[in-house]
Image (tube, helix red, strand yellow):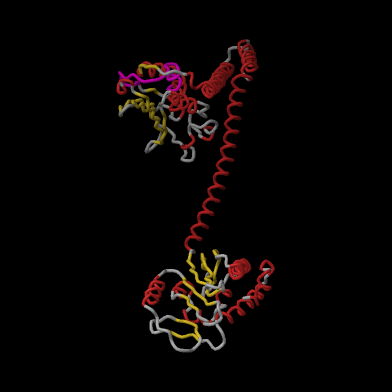
Amino acid sequence: MNQFKDMLADTDALSAPDALRMLEDLSKVFFPAGSATIETPDGLLTHAVPGPAAAQSEAEIKYQTLVEQIPAVIFMASLDGSVGKTYVSPHIETALGFRQQEWINDPVRWYRQIHPDDQGRWSSEAAELFLSGTPLRSVYRVIARDGHTVWFHSQATMVRGADGQPLFIHGVGFDITDLKEAEGHKERLERAVAARTLELAEANARLTILDRSKNEFLNLISHELRTPLNGLLGVGQIVLDEMPATPENKELVQMFEQSRKRILSILDDALLLTHIDVSGESFRSAPVALHAVLRHAIEHTAEFAESRDVILGPPAFSPHIVLGNQELLERALHALLETSVKFSEAGETVRIAYEVVPDFVRVIIESNGRTIPDSALPKFFDLFAIAETSTPGGDLGLGPPVAYRILSLFGASVSVANRDQFGIRLTISLNNVALNR
């Protein structure tokens, strides 16, 4: 081994051609001149100097049989220069596609098949084994006969004689390609999850900013605009009062009154939405008579329905007690009734019915008229999304989101769907106190 120390001492600077020459020189030590590959009666391929054949012991036979059943590449090479004996297990063909004998006949093949990117590192690790006897533990890639890459985890150990001189090295190489591919998949998955998490965080940040902007806008229109708007409406009322009572002027007065009510309703809804967002937990639930709440909501909607020539069908009497705040529930039902009126054609009737299900009482409101575009259904109760929905009775304002927010305060809910032919169906689910007792 002394003849290789100078070459192996500087393994960091060892080039691929140098490493190949080094292994070729080592092979001359492992396999002296005149040696040949022979096959034992038991099928073991060895590289030995011709001479009297030594009989295999029973232990050797058992060991060989065991080795050849292991799903790994087992290898051994002599280092003492006397008997150039080498061995590689038959699994080499399963792992890399090379026959056992052609691998043994070419002791430098292993290095040549190592992936070019791993050859330098393997050379350094092998040199450490040859020089100091430090066991080799390494993970590297090997190119199979058909060109595909196989990952190996190899371990090799040097065995010395009683005089301390190296006798041989032996070791094992495990195919860990599946494990490496799983690790690669895990890394790709982790990168994808990290990227998706970042996207969600950025989207959440944008939604937070948008939500804050909406609240600030609602606060602006409900507080800052009320005072100057009251001045404008007051001046407008004075001007209209002083105008002659002609048919044209009466029409202007009617238009002014409708616009005044509408803009004040939007301001009140905006103020309520802001109050719910800021102080939602302060609203307390209490038992409320459903029939009384619905009756008051119908009374508040009657004038608007009459102006649209729409009939509000009186519901049957309901003995149910539900949870909520009476004033807020009336406001929510009024907003939903007004929404149904807006979707109704003139001369049609808005029908109101009840349905009892476990733990809930449902109020079902159905209109006869236009339907909601499919694209608008999922965001029907979102703020500022309703302007996209056109109805015979005009745009919907803040009515649907106000009703949705109010009902959510008391554990209730509302959903919307198009009826089979025309019109919409609003379904309000309220907690039934009697059933929950």
Residue 138, by quadrant, is bottom right
Q: Nearer the viewer, residue 147 or 121?
A: 121
Q: Nearer the viewer, residue 417 or 45?
A: 45
Q: Please give the name of the residue rendered at 61% of the width and 79% of the height, measured from the top-left corner.
A: 24
Residue 23, by quadrant, is bottom right
Is residue 265 at least partly visible in the picture?
Answer: no
Q: Position of residue 278 (x, y in %)?
A: 54, 22
Q: Is residue 18 above or below residue 382?
A: below
Q: Position of residue 378 (x, y in %)?
A: 47, 37
On screen, residue 232 versus residue 334, left or right, reads: right
Is residue 434 at least partly visible in the picture?
Answer: yes
Q: Position of residue 202 (x, y in %)?
A: 59, 40
Q: Quadrant of the C terminus?
A: top left
Q: Position of residue 250 (x, y in %)?
A: 56, 16
Which portion, as a residue range, is magenta?
A: 314-333
Which residue is outermost to the front? Answer: 163
